[in-house]
Amino acid sequence: MNENGPIILKSLHGRDIEDHLDDIARLRIQVFREWPYLYDGDAAYEAGYLRTYTQASRSIAVLALEGDRVVGASTGLPMEDETEAFRLPLQAAGIDPATLFYCGESVLLPGYRGRGIGHAFFDARETHARRLGGFEWCAFAAVDRDRDDPRRPDGHRDNDVFWHKRGYRRSDITLQLPWKETGRGETAHALTFWLHPLEAIK
């Protein structure tokens, strides 16, 4: 299949995301099976995880569409609408979750990478946060992996440079999140928050 067609971005909010939950779940299961997540996903876990976004009226899901096919997706919502697993470490560090917009995961099929879609995902979510108003920070959480982990693919490049270009900086705030890992079953994983000051729209 030729994966060079035009890509259209479409943003959905709250309940409207429900129409594409299967597409988002499919992409998460496929893309996050790769390093560094090594996620052995299933539909039941996805249904529970993504319900947070459909129940939050101020959430966003940005879909990357090639025709009618969803080839990428990116999510976000106010941190105060996230689960305690995400909120409590921030509160312990003295950050009010109400001041932070959380950029959830971005997933994009391999053949569509390197075309600026990752930047477009961040642009859409940050613009949404600014339009909502009241947020001082945008943030996301990235899984921590040992650089000497033998499962790390040869030549793998982390996204740190990309995130730094977006203005995000790694914090010392971490959370624990369990998911089924390929070959290991249910495993607790450490993730670290990256933060970026969110300027108001001029």
Image: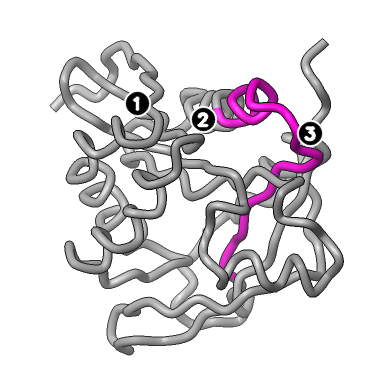
Query: Which residue is found at the position 63% from the left and 74% from the top?
Result: 175
Query: Which residue is found at the position 53% from the left and 43% from the top?
Result: 77
Mark 3 secondary-structure assignment: loop
Alpha carbon of mark 3 to alpha carbon of mark 1: how far?
24 Å
Q: How many marks?
A: 3
The quadrant holding residue 163 is top right
The quadrant holding residue 202 is top right
51, 41: nearer the viewer: 51
Q: Is residue 78 left or right of residue 112?
A: right
Q: Is residue 61 left or right of residue 92?
A: left
Query: Tags 2 and 1 in contact by the CB under 8 Å rule?
Result: yes
200, 145: nearer the viewer: 200
Q: Which residue is mark 3?
A: 198
Q: Which residue is mark 1?
A: 64
In this view, the residue farthest toward the right is 94
Give me the disc on residue 1.
none
Q: Earlier in the sequence, mark 3 or mark 1?
A: 1
Q: Which residues are magenta?
A: 125-143
Three-letter amino acid code at disc 3?
Leu
Q: Is 182 covered by the magenta stretch?
A: no
In the displayed structure, 161 sits above or below 193; it is above
Query: Which residue is found at the position 51% from the left and 30% from the top?
Result: 121
Q: Earlier in the sequence, mark 3 or mark 2?
A: 2
Q: Earlier in the sequence, mark 2 or mark 1?
A: 1
Q: Residues within 10 Å of mark 3 (few under 14, many from 20)?
A: many
Three-letter amino acid code at disc 2?
Phe
Q: Position of residue 142 (x, y in %)?
A: 60, 61
Query: Which residue is found at the position 24% from the left and 59% from the top?
Result: 47
Q: Position of residue 147 (x, y in %)?
A: 63, 75
Q: Is 140 covered by the magenta stretch?
A: yes
Give me the disc on residue 121.
2
